Amino acid sequence: MERDELLLAMKDRMPEKRYIHTIGVTDTAIELAKHFGEDSKKAEVSAILHDSCKYADRDWMKQVIIEQQMDPTLLEFHHELWHGPVGAYVAKTEFNVTDEDMLNAIRFHTTGRALQSNLEKIVYIADMIEPNRKFPGVDDLRAAANKLELDDLMIKCISHSISFLINKHQPIFPDSFKCYNNLLLQKKGKVKE
Ligand SMILES: [Fe+2]
Ligand SMILES: [Fe+2]
């Protein structure tokens, strides 16, 4: 499916505000992919599909997580975290995405994970800094996107997300900590890429 067809399919699945966010993430992901020398078409399609399950039925998502034997830890955490992994399942089964890197970019767009690919980082970052996002510190993250290396930018974004959740006394999904630790240890040369 091409961009317009995919976007049309997303329009039916989400309210107007989320659809505008989806377009923002898509355009930002394309820009970041070009800037960091990654495949902009893969970034575009992953970004269009990243929130396809944001408004999916909660019981249905729970059932998919169980039936598809996804990480059972997901069910211990807020259902907000389910739309990434279930979105990857939908991308594969309904939209015929077979590229594992694109599926992972959708799967881990909310939490991050250790050993992310560049495409995964790009979709995670685009989701956070797209032009319609408004939260304290977002302008600083946007400015950093033009200045920093991809890994440093990812460290800045995941640090912001973790700090935000800690300040709100919200639990942190283990993959987010693993993402943060892995990036820092990689930087110090303590783990292999
Ligand atoms: Fe999302
Ligand atoms: Fe999103």
Image (spheres, rainbow, N blue to C red):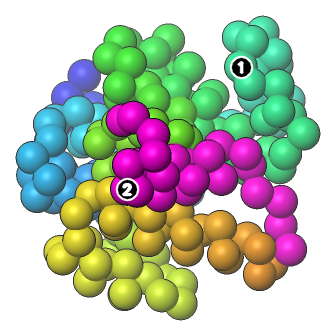
Quadrant including the N terminus: top left
On the question of residue 7 being in view, the answer is no
**What residue appears at the point 38 percent right and 70 percent down from the top-left corner?**
129
Mark identifier at residue 189? none
**What residue appears at the point 23 percent right and 71 percent down from the top-left corner?**
148
Q: Is residue 43 above or below residue 126?
A: above
The image shows residue 187 at horizontal and vertical percentages of 37, 56
Residue assigned mark 1 = 70
Residue assigned mark 2 = 187
Total numbered badges shown on the rendered structure: 2
Q: Residues within 10 Å of mark 1 (few under 14, many from 20)?
A: some
Mark 1 vs 2, N-terminal side: 1
Q: Nearer the viewer, residue 164 or 106?
A: 164
* Disc 1 residue type (three-letter): Met
Left or right of 31, for residue 102:
right
Q: Is residue 109 above or below residue 104?
A: below
Q: Which residues are magenta?
A: 169-193
